[in-house]
């Protein structure tokens, strides 16, 4: 789901000429969830990807893997709206083979208490979207945002977050190198 939101926000940044974008996430008691991204830009001309542009097709494929679907069209204003609805626990996502060993309790996030999160991504618009999504969860407190290795390492040292959400494909540096540097100081730190 995160990659679908990322692609939608990248499309807004590259094509929409928007002044504002909103990202809304809602979950149902039945395990379903829906994310809606709306912008106030120029709007989408067609629901199919233009030649040599595969973003919309990739978003649809990813939604299908989640057992869901994507709806793309003009938003109520003048821009583009993108909605993705999925159901948690879709058969296509179930792991095959023996179950994974559960991590020790000290490495798990506690959803009954407040957990601190650091978001690391080199795309400011995407970072803001992730922070907006996380802000809707009462058990999560975003303690910082970083766009590069130096910022990320400084914020990890300063805040000691319970979890670091890290983009592995940064423009000028490897997210894996940042992950290794975060873990080198304290192997129990959580980053994903």
Image (tube, grey):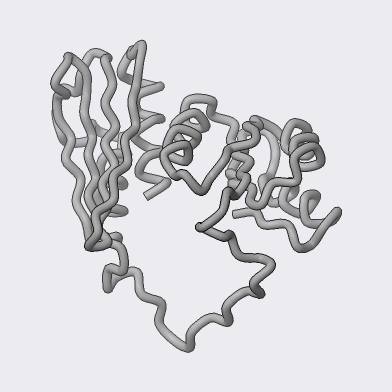
Residue 126 horizontal/vertical position (percent): 47, 31
Q: Quadrant of residue 183?
A: bottom right
Total marks placed: 0
Name the residue located 64 percent from the left edge and 72 percent from the top edge: 105
Q: The C terminus lies in which quarter of the figure?
A: bottom right
On screen, residue 127 versus residue 31, left or right, reads: right
Instruction: Look at the image and tell me whether residue 67 can be seen.
Output: yes
Residue reaching furthest to the front: 112
The residue nearer to you, when weighing 109 against 147, is 109
From this viewpoint, is residue 168 visible?
Answer: no
Q: Looking at the image, which residue is at 30% across and 63% down?
A: 88
Q: Is residue 81 above or below residue 107?
A: above
Locate residue 132 relative to residue 8 in the image: left or right.
right
Expressed as whole percent of the image width and height from the top left, the position of residue 65 reads 29, 61
Q: Residue at x 40, y 82 (%)?
A: 96
Residue 8 occupies quadrant: top left
Q: Which residue shows up at 24% across the image and 59% down it?
A: 29
Image side of residue 156 versus residue 95, left or right:
right
| Residue 129 picture location, percent across and down | 44, 32
């Amino acid at each position: 789901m995160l990659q679908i939101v990322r692609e939608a926000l990248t499309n807004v940044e590259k094509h929409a000429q928007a002044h504002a974008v909103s990202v809304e996430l809602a979950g149902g008691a039945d395990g379903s969830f829906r994310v809606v991204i709306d912008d106030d830009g120029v709007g989408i001309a067609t629901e199919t990807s233009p030649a040599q542009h595969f973003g919309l097709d990739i978003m649809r494929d990813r939604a299908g893997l989640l057992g869901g679907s994507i709806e793309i069209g003009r938003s109520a204003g003048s821009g583009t709206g993108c909605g993705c609805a999925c159901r948690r626990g879709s058969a296509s996502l179930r792991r095959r083979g023996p179950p994974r060993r559960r991590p020790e309790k000290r490495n798990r996030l506690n959803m009954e208490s407040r957990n601190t999160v650091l978001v690391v991504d080199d795309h400011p618009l995407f970072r803001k979207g992730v922070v907006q999504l996380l802000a809707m969860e009462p058990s999560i407190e975003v303690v910082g945002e970083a766009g590069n290795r130096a910022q990320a390492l400084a914020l990890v040292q300063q805040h000691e977050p319970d979890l670091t959400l890290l983009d592995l494909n940064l423009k000028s540096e490897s997210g894996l190198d940042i992950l290794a540097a975060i873990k080198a100081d304290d192997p129990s730190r959580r980053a994903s």
